Each structure stands twice: as structure tokens, then as C-alpha cells.
Image (cartoon, helix red, strand yellow):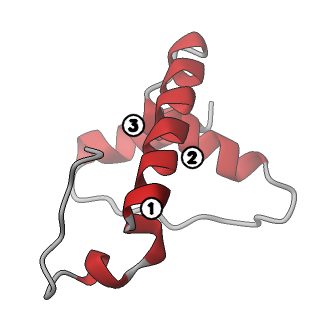
Amino acid sequence: NKNSIFKANDRRSRLKDFSKEKLEKNLADIQIHQVKAKKSTKSLLQYSIKKILEEKSVQSTITGIKNISQLKENYEATI
């Protein structure tokens, strides 16, 4: 949310990507990708994984998986 405020002991309060201006731009970018994902019939997660894998400079990805449903969703990104 663009009105997010992070406490001083929150790591995000020190990262440039979470500064107010940058956070607003990042959230706008996410909205653009949500529309593209919907058009591609993939979830935003699947769309993101697929786009990363399409990058020629990327040889592999490591995704966090805690359960079988997350594994299945990540797999769906590759097909």
C-alpha cells in the first residue's frame, strides 16, 4: 500500500526501494504486471517466474516452496 510506513527497526525503512517515491512507482509497476498476467491467464506469481526464466542472462531460479500447492503453482509458470 502506498501509504505504508515502516518503523525504524524494520529493514524496509532503510531500503531505497521502500522509500515513498520508489514504493509508489514499484506498486504502479506491479499493477501493470497484474494486468499482463491476467491477459496471459497466469497468476502474478506464475507470470513473474515465467518472465524471469525468459531472460537470457538467467540460467536458473530458486523459489521458496513451503507446500505442494506452491510447488504446483511454480511448476505451472513453466508450461
Mark 1: give few (<14), some (14-19) or many (20+) Cα within 10 Å. few
Residue labelled with disc 1:
63
Q: Residue at x 50, y 32 (%)?
A: 76
Q: Position of residue 33 (x, y in %)?
A: 56, 31
| Disc number placed over residue 49 in the picture, else none | 2
Q: Position of residue 73 (x, y in %)?
A: 39, 37
Q: Residue at x 25, y 46 (%)?
A: 68
Residue labelled with disc 3:
73
Whichever of labels 1 and 3 marks the residue nearer the N terminus, that label is 1
Q: Is residue 21 above or below residue 69?
A: below
- Secondary structure at numbered mark 1: loop
Q: Are marks 2 and 1 in contact (CB under 8 Å)?
A: yes
Tell me which amino acid carries mark 3: Glu
- Secondary structure at numbered mark 2: helix
Q: Is residue 22 left or right of residue 50?
A: left
- Secondary structure at numbered mark 3: helix
Residue 9 falls in which quadrant of the image? Answer: bottom left
Q: Is residue 14 above or below residue 21?
A: below
From the image, state whether disc 3 or disc 2 is nearer to you: 2
